[in-house]
Image: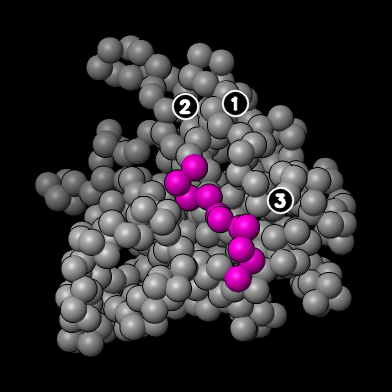
Amino acid sequence: KTTMKTAFCFVAAIATASAFAPQAKPAFKTAVKAEDFLEADPYWDQSTVPLNTYKNKSPFTGKVVSTKRIVGPKATGETCHIIIDHEGEFPYWEGQSWGVIPPGTREKDGKPHSVRLYSIASSRYGDDMTGKTGSLCVRRATYWCPELQAEDPAKKGICSNFLCDTTPGSEITMTGPTGKVMLLPEEDPATDYIMVATGTGIAPYRGFIRRLFVEETPAAAAYKGEAWLFLGVANSDALLYDDEWQSVLEKYPDNFRLDYALSREQQNKDGGKMYIQDKVEEYADEIFSKLDNGAHIYFCGLKGMMPGIQEMLKGVAESKGLDYDAWLKGLKSKKQWHVEVY
């Protein structure tokens, strides 16, 4: 497995790290060196997870390495992958978020803008695996005005547009890292992870998957479970990081699974649009069985995704003669249920 993983490190570095890596550094600087220098002891111990190192009143200034559009021409909206250099001064773990304070002041009262939270889209080692960068996956928020039949720039998302407009060297005012709800429980390397995302909710799972399959981490060396990714987007052009998922799938078909819900290209069992809950429902029996056996399930994306998912899960639970509320309470009490929506 070590030989395979080392070889795969090269493949992954070529596929992704070199595309995103800071140009001032050699693309392969750490590609074949083990990613083990930012680990807890033992590596699964979460007692030392960094939290709120930088706060609103004393934020951190990161510098943009690169900003790239990562969706095709027919995608609904623009999504960017932004790599930020933190010089190793702003450590975080997979599943955490960074806060971003956009420049300028609010129109209504002249006060600074409030912090916006973004799930970090890289492992703790960063895309270049030096431990000195972190990445964000950001969709540019725009508002379509039905009266103007055009986008209204006055109502565009301040922070997402600021981030998507950054260029190498742009400074970003940041806080955090925050959050423990989306951390990976790694003590049992046979744990199954079910990761459900819509759109940019893919961000934390990219960190998970890089940690488990792309990098030479202790977690990767030990992992024997199955990581199952569900991603819901509008169409094929809106898929995020598909080349990375396909690489992992090719190398680790027994430990990684991938399912897409493309709402404008696929139909659900009733002939309607294929939304994320419909795709998850197709595997409901297997997912319920995995959860009964200790799997952890994660949900990340727009908060509008959850009612449909909850309704679907409730229907499945009742068809199995389960009390849904009691079943869900059981998952939560065992910390198997992880939700981060915005």
- Amino acid carrying label 3: it is Tyr
Above-or-below relation of 291 to 127: below
Residue 285 in sight in this render: yes
- Amino acid carrying label 1: it is Thr
Q: Is residue 197 magenta?
A: no
The answer to which quarter of the image holds residue 273 is: bottom left
Helix, strand or loop at mark 3: loop
Magenta-drawn segment? 180-190
Q: Residue at the left extreme? A: 147
Where, quadrant-wise, is the C terminus in this rendering? top left
The label nearer to you, 3 versus 2, is 3
Q: At 56% across and 56% down in the image, what residue appears? A: 185
Q: Is residue 183 magenta?
A: yes
Q: Earlier in the sequence, mark 1 or mark 3?
A: 3
Task: Give the CA separation, mark 3 to mark 2.
Answer: 32 Å
Where, quadrant-wise, is the N terminus in this rendering? bottom right
- Amino acid carrying label 2: it is Ile
Q: Residue at label 1?
A: 53
Q: Nearer the viewer, residue 331 or 35?
A: 331
Q: Residue at label 3?
A: 43
Q: Earlier in the sequence, mark 3 or mark 2?
A: 3
The answer to which quarter of the image holds residue 236 is: bottom left
Q: Mark 3 near mark 2, Cβ–Cβ under 8 Å?
A: no
Q: At 43% across and 20% down in the image, what residue appears? A: 104
Helix, strand or loop at mark 2: strand
Helix, strand or loop at mark 1: loop
The label nearer to you, 1 versus 3, is 3
